[in-house]
Image (cartoon, grey):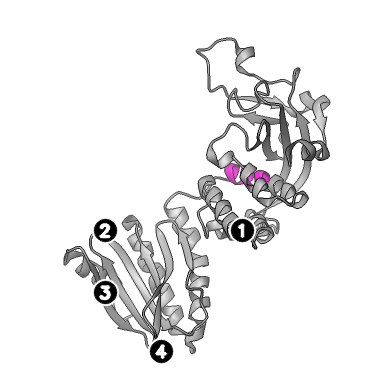
């Protein structure tokens, strides 16, 4: 494009002050855009002006690492799709993102296509931003989250009390188990199909002694590059099931954020598909091969990590029907 974005942003930033500097630019097809800088924070801004009548949610909001996209009203006639970079360390890639977006916008022949164009480019670039900021979840964490959400989806399918179901997913809040409901808790372990054991994070994770019921779900999966049943797809399915409850959707989005997937970033997790090979349920009770405080018998030892062979607790297997009665 004729206008050098970095030069404009640099000039605006150097001007200082505590206000928003904006410069209007016009694309070759007539679209009006603005390049801006929020001086007090150094955040960079790019806005696309569209007619107020173009159907686009006025509450539109998407976030991906260091970037926020939202709709801002421009009065009676116009509104602005505003793209804001808050992480200035990503300025170079942000510049490339905006330049790519501008090229795509200039190819449009109808202003009504602007929102779809913006959404496409966001989907394409969000993954790159996440990779550059080093904040994509690791494959191991993705696998674990897929297992937790699989169980959450199962619970939602068997209960009409969706508020209770979403509220029971307490893992993102740092609880010892992934799910808890009163004095009943459930821990989920998801491993590759070939793994003979499960990893236990600490001596409290499978400590049943302070609970009425503690269950363990072990899910074995195969991972397939570009497979169909992805983490993104599962998130979308859960959201569809609670779509008529806006406050519950907000709660679920908040929990996903705490788990490491901010609002709008589920699209970054559509490359790995999962095939569930087995899903088994166990009740943790006396005799189960675990390490807890009473068996360690040494108060100075804590945060113990260990592995358990799955074959060693086959005698404790139960079924989901039992868990449903105690848990849902």
Find out whether the residues at labels 3 and 2 contact each other: C-beta distance under 8 Å: no
Q: Check disc 3 and report its element: helix, strand or loop.
A: strand
Residue under pointer 4: 29
Residue under pointer 1: 270
> Nearest the camera: 201 or 124?
201
Q: Earlier in the sequence, mark 4 or mark 1?
A: 4
Can you see residue 54? yes
**Left or right of 30: which side holds 168?**
right
Front tag of 2 and 1: 2
Q: How crowded is mark 3: few (under 14 residues within 10 Å), some or many (20 or more)?
A: some
Residue 231 position, x and y percent, is: 63, 53
> Nearest the camera: 156 or 235?
156
Residue drawn where x is 68% and y is 39% of the image: 190
Residue under pointer 3: 22
**Split into 4 quadrants, where in the image is the C terminus?**
top right
> Nearest the camera: 218 or 5?
218
Residue 41 badge? 2
Compared with 115, 40 (above or below) is above
- What number of labels is visible? 4
Residue 230 badge? none
Front tag of 4 and 2: 2
Q: Check disc 1 and report its element: helix, strand or loop.
A: loop
What secondary structure is the stretch in magenta mostly built from? Answer: helix
Q: Which of marks 3 and 1 is nearer the N terminus?
A: 3
For the magenta stretch, what is the residue range? 139-148
């Amino acid at each position: 494009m004729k206008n050098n974005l970095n030069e404009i942003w640099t000039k605006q930033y150097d001007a200082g002050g505590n206000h928003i500097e904006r410069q209007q630019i016009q694309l070759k097809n007539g679209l009006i855009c603005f390049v801006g800088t929020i001086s007090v924070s150094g955040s960079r801004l790019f806005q696309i002006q569209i007619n107020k009548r173009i159907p686009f949610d006025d509450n539109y909001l998407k976030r991906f690492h260091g970037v926020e996209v939202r709709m801002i009203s421009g009065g009676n006639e116009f509104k602005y799709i505003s793209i804001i970079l808050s992480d200035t360390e990503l300025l170079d890639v942000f510049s490339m993102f905006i330049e790519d977006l501008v090229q795509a916008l200039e190819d449009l022949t109808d202003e009504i296509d602007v929102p779809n164009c913006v959404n496409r480019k966001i989907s394409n670039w969000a993954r790159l931003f996440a990779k550059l900021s080093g904040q994509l979840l690791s494959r191991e964490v993705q696998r674990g989250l897929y297992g937790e959400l699989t169980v959450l989806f199962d619970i939602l399918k068997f209960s009409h009390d969706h508020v209770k179901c979403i509220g029971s997913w307490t893992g993102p809040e740092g609880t010892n188990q992934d799910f808890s409901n009163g004095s009943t808790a459930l821990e989920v372990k998801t491993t590759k199909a070939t793994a003979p054991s499960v990893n236990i994070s600490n001596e409290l994770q499978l400590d049943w002694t302070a609970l009425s019921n503690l269950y363990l779900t072990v899910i074995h999966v195969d991972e397939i590059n570009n497979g169909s049943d992805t983490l993104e797809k599962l998130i979308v399915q859960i959201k569809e099931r609670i779509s008529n409850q806006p406050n519950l959707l907000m709660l679920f989005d908040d929990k996903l954020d705490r788990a490491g997937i901010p609002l709008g970033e589920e699209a970054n997790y559509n490359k790995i598909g999962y095939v569930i090979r087995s899903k088994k349920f166990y009740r943790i009770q006396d005799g189960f091969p675990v390490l807890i405080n009473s068996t360690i018998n040494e108060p100075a030892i804590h945060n113990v990590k260990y592995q358990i062979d799955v074959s060693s607790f086959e005698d404790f297997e139960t079924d989901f029907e039992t868990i449903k009665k105690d848990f849902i």
